[in-house]
Image: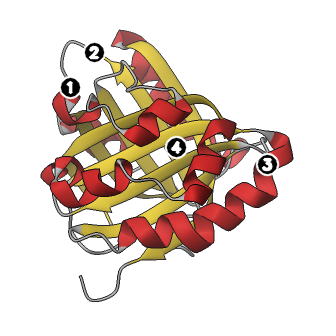
């Protein structure tokens, strides 16, 4: 959601226990996201809510480069969780957290033009920038980005990971499509294109989200 350029991305998909949702948002908004975005090299934090759900979230942090997400400043936070973080993480269900490096992008966005996000995690023998070029011209699409997982950084074991119990997802590729469209008829051309593209893909997870909270670092 930031206009600052970065090549690193942490993406975390999880369901939060329904009874803990209010407390989760309090923690994530007022402590966790500000703490993370304050780390050197972090550019912005974003949280999206799954379409048609009340408790499925995509949480992301954009960074200057993937190395920031395996660097000492970030790892120090991951290995010294606050008391509130220790309280919150056990309420995460079906967690999948990956570190990615940016491969290709087209378009620019802001909160008002692109409140929706399609995330597609998948495996394929190969993919390239032409995927972004095919998706970007679709009506309602503001920005399209393609990422590849960094398995080494994604696999780092930390104190926080021991609490929520999850690990990295198995999909190598991540496509993020930020758009103005939802799940109705206006989104049909994009869904059709993604369905066509995904015929050669394996282990596909395709989810639609709407923006829930954003925190951008000012001044870099």
| Residue 8 pos. (x, y %) | 22, 52
Element at label 1: loop
The quarter of the picture where residue 112 lies is: bottom right
For residue 73, side relative to residue 3 (left or right): left
Residue that numbered label 4 is attached to: 118
Q: Residue at x 17, y 29 (%)?
A: 152
How far, Cα to Cα, is label 4 from label 2? Answer: 18 Å
How far, Cα to Cα, is label 3 from label 4? Answer: 25 Å
For residue 18, side relative to residue 10 (left or right): right
Vertical placement of residue 194 versus 214, above or below: above
Q: Residue at x 28, y 24 (%)?
A: 172
Q: Are marks 2 and 1 in contact (CB under 8 Å)?
A: yes
| Residue 28 pos. (x, y %) | 59, 62
Residue that numbered label 3 is attached to: 20
Of the residues tagged 2 and 3, which is closer to the observer?
Answer: 3
| Residue 213 pos. (x, y %) | 60, 67
Q: Earlier in the sequence, mark 3 or mark 4?
A: 3
How far, Cα to Cα, is label 4 from label 1? Answer: 18 Å
| Residue 171 pos. (x, y %) | 35, 21
Residue that numbered label 2 is attached to: 124
Residue that numbered label 1 is attached to: 127
Element at label 2: loop
């Amino acid at each position: 959601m930031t206009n600052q350029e970065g090549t690193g991305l942490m993406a975390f998909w999880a369901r939060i226990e329904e009874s803990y949702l209010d407390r989760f948002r309090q923690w994530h908004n007022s402590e966790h996201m500000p703490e993370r975005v304050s780390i050197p090299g972090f550019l912005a934090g974003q949280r999206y809510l799954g379409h048609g759900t009340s408790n499925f979230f995509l949480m992301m942090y954009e960074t200057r480069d993937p190395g920031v997400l395996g660097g000492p400043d970030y790892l120090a936070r991951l290995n010294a969780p606050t008391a509130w973080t220790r309280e919150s993480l056990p309420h995460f269900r079906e967690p999948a957290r990956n570190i990615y490096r940016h491969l290709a992008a087209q378009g620019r966005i802001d909160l008002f033009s692109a409140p929706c996000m399609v995330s597609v995690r998948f495996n394929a023998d190969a993919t390239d920038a032409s995927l972004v070029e095919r998706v970007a011209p679709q009506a309602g699409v503001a920005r399209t980005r393609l990422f590849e997982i960094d398995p080494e950084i994604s696999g780092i074991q930390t104190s926080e990971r021991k609490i929520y119990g999850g690990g990295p997802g198995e999909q190598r590729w991540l496509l993020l499509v930020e758009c103005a469209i939802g799940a109705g008829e206006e989104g049909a051309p994009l869904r059709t294109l993604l369905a066509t593209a995904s015929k050669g893909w394996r282990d596909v997870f395709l989810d639609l989200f709407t923006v829930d909270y954003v925190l951008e670092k000012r001044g870099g």
